[in-house]
Amino acid sequence: MTEAIGFVRACALAELPAQGTFAVELNGIPLVIIQSDGEIFALQEFCTHEDVSLADGEVYDHTVECWLHGSCFDLRTGKPTGPPASKPLATYPVRVDGDDVYVSVPAS
Amino acid sequence: MLGPRGVPGGRAPGLALQGAVESAAPLSRLHGQGSFDPADFTVPTGREEQWRFTPLRRLRGLHSDLGAGDGKVTVAVDAAPRVAVEAAQHGDPRLGTAYLPSDRVSARAFASFGEATVVTIPSGAEITQPTWITVRGEDAAGPAFGHLLIDVRANASAVVVLEHGGSATYADNVELVVGDGARLTVVSVQDWANDAVHLSHHHAQVGKDATVAHTAVTLGGGVVRLAPSVRYTGPGGDAQLRGMYYADAGQHLEHRLFVDHSAPNCRSRVTYKGALQGDGAHAVWIGDVIIRPEATGTDTYEYNRNLVLTDGTRVDSVPNLEILTGEVVGAGHASASGRLEDQHLFYLMTRGIPFDEARRLVLRGFFGELIAEIEVAELRQRITAAIEGELDRMIEAGPGTVFADAPAEPTGDGHR
């Protein structure tokens, strides 16, 4: 997990689908915010296999699946749970404050 | 602009079919229609076959419409005697006669360049002294566009060195017009600073019995995507496309070759070799050849080798061959990517040569055959030194950078 620095507002809770994704760039880092079963996660946006945006991926069973080649990543750890990806996604701490989602990302 | 040529009406069905077969229109899925108008190409998303290996996010908008072309790139020419150098403006009838942009970035470069450089070698002149063209970027913040035309008239011969350096976000087209019976040797060195982005097309139009020898040497730059292509206008043409690249951590070096055998009895050889080291080093090699129905007697071979020196790198190597006539002399391709062969290193070490030195020797041999073909002695030395410098950097980084979990046998794939 990346060292927690300042939390930056990523999106409003209302913008996040109940079981889905929201792409945002914070401090120059492309992120995907994912809500799954009431929990919210922030991960690097692009699949470690072929640089595909996971904002278009499918969310189920605490994983996000890349739409292009089917790599799955665990939302809690960022680790791949299925090939072809073999490297983990970066994960970032998330805080919900009122109606907004905040993510801790390294300063640019 | 160059749509598939329609079958003229009123012909007998048999003739119409013949007309369709001999059409000069692009046949390939990869090399479809070209245009001088950027608006004829959609903005790539990264999912297109042409763009799927290229990190579009790192192009600083060269592929879309960002930036007005306010970047600073200077072109200086140190011409050999009898070689004419001129600046040309948009609308000059000589520009764009041999080349039609085949993607959005190339079309943008043609539409947006400030001033083109035209280098003319008069017919019959045999010039052995190299003409040195230095392309230097001052600042990578804004995109810059360029155009270069090298016109070698009939039966002339010339050597041109194209040297790229500095920091830039640069897209350009290089037209190489090689007249009947002429011979052109081009060495293009891409040794940019780490933040540079360079997308370039080098297109050679090879006349009857003419020869073009093109060598790409790509060592430096953040993202370098070079697309050398060849088209023949008469029989007997010969194209030798050679290249070497050395990708370090974080570098994306891409070479996309395309040889369009459009005339009978022409020859082409594509030989590219690369080495990769460090996290995120990415090399892409695409070797496309089309042998059109009219190109009987074609002799072509494409060859790519990649040496993967550490963990964390990635190679994509894709040769494609479309053969539309069976009457060829030869048509083949080969691609393989793998590690240094353990047995080679072991053999050298049994002779008392230390591991690092053994690796250096094998790598020197790997690139040596290509370096030896470069006709400019000064460049040979500099490129040899640059490649050894790259290897030294890896050795300095320590043994930890070399395959943490190396398999017992060297890996390799591809086919021959």
Image (cartoon, helix red, strand yellow):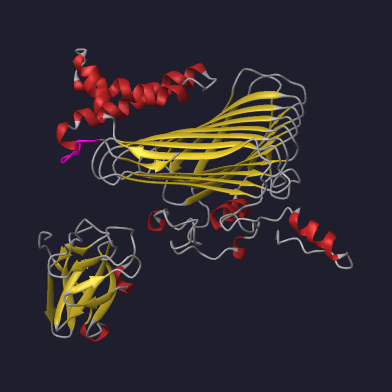
Asked if one can make out residue B230 in the rendered structure from this viewpoint, the answer is yes
Residue at the spot 29% in from the left edge and 58% down from the top edge: A49
Q: Position of residue B306 (x, y in %)?
A: 37, 37
Q: Position of residue B384 (x, y in %)?
A: 39, 22
| The residue stretch that appears in magenta | B402-409
Q: How many marks?
A: 0
| In-front residue for pair B327/B260 | B327
Please give left or right for residue B149 compared with residue B282 in the image.
right
Residue at the spot 79% in from the left edge and 61% down from the top edge: B17
| In-front residue for pair B262/B192 | B262
Please give left or right for residue A6 compared with residue B395 in the image.
left
Please give left or right for residue B244 compared with residue B391 in the image.
right
Q: Position of residue B360 (x, y in %)?
A: 29, 22
Q: Is residue B246 above or below residue B4?
A: above
Q: Is residue B73 above or below residue B341?
A: below
Residue at the spot 26% in from the left edge and 35% down from the top edge: B410
| In-front residue for pair B8/B132 | B8
